[in-house]
Structures are given as structure tokens and as C-alpha cells.
Amino acid sequence: MTEHRQKLLIVEEDLGLQKQLKRSYEGFDVFCASSREEAVALLREVEPDTKIIVVSGDGAHESALRAIAALQQPDSDGALLLGTILTASPEMVKVARTIERIAPADISVLLLGASGTGKELLARGLHNASGRRDQPFVAINCGAIPENLLESELFGHEKGSFTGAVKTTEGKIELAHGGTLFLDEVGDIPLALQVKLLRFLQERIIERIGGRKAIHVDVRVVCATHRNLSKMISEQTFRDDLFYRLAEVTVNIPPLAARTGDAILLAKHFVSKFAREMNPTIKGMTSGALAAIDAWNWPGNVRELENRIKRAVIMAEGAFVTADDLDLGDGNADDLQLNLKAVREAADRKAITRAVARTEGNISSAAKLLGISRPTLYDLLKQYDLQL
């Protein structure tokens, strides 16, 4: 019987050291790479277990951490992007790459997307990838605070400035000094307060309610909303000059239904997470559960998916979450398409991305699931320009 040997990937740019290390691990099938790109290619080709050991000769702890992070983020195969966003879809990879590019630039960013799409996670990712990462990240949901209290929450107040103001209190803007201020649901800010917010954005100076002292604040503003701000501007319920101050860069976040393969990938992640926390007997999901997740259109986006999985893990009686545990319907049928070439291409794209997501980026397993060879799958990935 052939001995099953574990696979070991060594990443070392010095060819002499590669040879020495290879001889030191004779009990393993050793593969060597000289760069991150070679290492990622080998991970995909030979599929070793993804345990990573970094040996640094100069005690460079930060360099070692960066090396691990780089290997854990190989382009898009279900990558953990910006430290927070788990995705396998080209649509969300594009969003994450945009966030990474604009993070170092100290400009205002507007995140547009439906509720539950991960706007705050992206805002935190932007902050963590910026030069302000070691300073405060302060978030405020403008739609969750009564209109008469929102001004005080944002700008703070002096003691005695109104009934109940028993002490001087800094507002969220002031607390975010040096860091990032995240204004969630910025479309819910009333017109009168929009004027004061615009003045702050223009001059970077605030005054607390009841105060006369001008306070300089150095802060990056990131905001988000699910509302149609263009329509609100035409209806004169949102100021166009404020919009242009807030939206130096606008990022549109796709709904979960438009993120190819992400529902399955995220469902697996949430099952593992909640099984550890609440029901260790759960080992995974049945094929029926995966099919139900695939078919559902997720009107509540990632938040709905997370809540469904959480409930299913708690309620499941067996070792695997079933379709019944998820309590989902049959989903919505795709619109009828009459062009056969378009139908075939759409079906191919959908099947490939779902197979890759279900197998967590394992190309060999995805090819088996699709009933094709691995070279054929690589050809299709290239043909349809799928960055998976």
C-alpha cells in the first residue's frame, strides 16, 4: 500500500535554503516557492493543507504577520478581504479592491447599498486599511436617533445648554478626532442639521450646543445609506452641496443575491461560527440545505442569511442543518431567456461559481462536482474571465 505523505509548502527566496529545508523534511512531500505568486499557484495546484509557518531570521514580527496575511488572501478564492468581508464573488471582490485603493487617500466616501449588505464592515475595513487605523473609528446610526437628539449626539453639548444637560459632553465628531467618523443612514439627517454638518465638512470646525468655542476636528468622514440620494436631492429633502462633500468617492455595494456564490460561502462560515458557539454537534449542512440557500433571493441580504443560519443551528436536531431547519421557500425562478448562447453562458457561470464556492476554492473538487476535468474547468474560468 502506498504511504500517504503530508504535503508541505515552503516559501523561501534563497534557493540554497530551499534545498536545505527540503532535505530536513524528508517525511513530507515538499513543494518550494520563491514568491507569494508562486506560493498561491502551488496552493491551488497541489492543494496542501493551509497551515502556514513563517520563519524570520531577523526577528521581523510585523513582516511575518504580513506574509501570513498575504497567503491568506490569495486574490479571490473565498478570500477574507479587508480583514472582515468574506466573499467569493467577482462583484464583491471589485468593491473590496476599490476600498483598498481609496483607503490611503484622505477623502470622504459614500457607501450605497441595501440594509444588511455590510456597509459598516466595509467602512471599518476602509479605516483599518488607512493611515488612521490606530485612531478611533466612531460610528453613529443617524436613522436610529430621534431628530431632537441627533444634533447633540453629533456635535456634543455644554453643561446647562438644555434641560437634562447636567455635564459637558463631547459629540461623535469630536470623539473621532484623528480617526474615522462613520455616518450610517446619512439620508435620514434632517435638513436643518444638514446645514450644520455641511459647515463642519467645509471648515473642519465645530461648536458644541450651548458653546461658543470653535473646536478644530481632524477626521475622515465615511457615510452610508440605503436611500436614493439623487431622488431626495430632486425632492429637496437632501442638500446637493452636502452630497458632493460626502461623496468624493461613491461605492455601490451589490445585494447578496447579486454576489455570485457568496450565499453558500457565507452560510458555511456562519454554520461553523454558530456551531462552535451554540451547538457543537452540528457538522455542516445537507445538500438540500445548500440548494435551498442557492435558490433563495435573500431580500434581507447577509443579515437575513446570518439570522436564518443562527436559528437553524439552534433548532437543528441532527448533525447537519437541513432545508427544513432553514425554513426557506423555493426561491424565485430566473427570468425566461430566449437566446440559447446567453442561456448556456449564464448557466455555466452560475454552476461554476457555485461549485467553487461550495468546495471553498478547491478546483479539483469543484471539477468533480461539475462532472468535468480540472483542465476543462480552468479553460472555462479563462473563457468566462471568472476570477475565482
Image: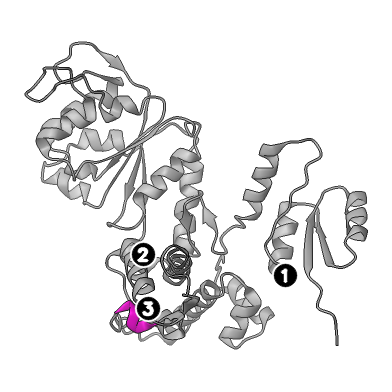
Q: Residue at x 11, y 17 (%)?
A: 160
Percent across and percent down for residue 344 are 47, 84
SS of the residue under disc 1: helix
Please tell me whether mark 3 or mark 1 is closer to you in this view. Answer: 3
Which sits in the foreground, 387 or 51? Answer: 51
Which sits in the foreground, 384 or 165? Answer: 165
Q: Which residue is mark 2?
A: 306
In the figure, 68 relative to 317: above or below?
A: above
- Please state if 309 lies on the left or on the right of 24 as rendered: left
Q: What segment carries the magenta color?
A: 322-327
Q: Main secondary structure of the magenta part?
A: helix
SS of the residue under disc 3: loop
Q: Which residue is mark 3?
A: 316
Q: CA distance from mark 3 to mark 1?
A: 37 Å
In the figure, 100 relative to 277: above or below?
A: above
Tag 1: amino acid: Glu
- Please state if 160 lies on the left or on the right of 250 as rendered: left
Percent across and percent down for residue 252 are 35, 53
Q: Residue at x 17, y 50 (%)?
A: 231
- Residue 45 shows which numbered tag? 1
- Please state if 325 lies on the left or on the right of 95 as rendered: left
Q: CA distance from mark 2 to mark 1?
A: 32 Å
Residue 64 part of the magenta segment: no
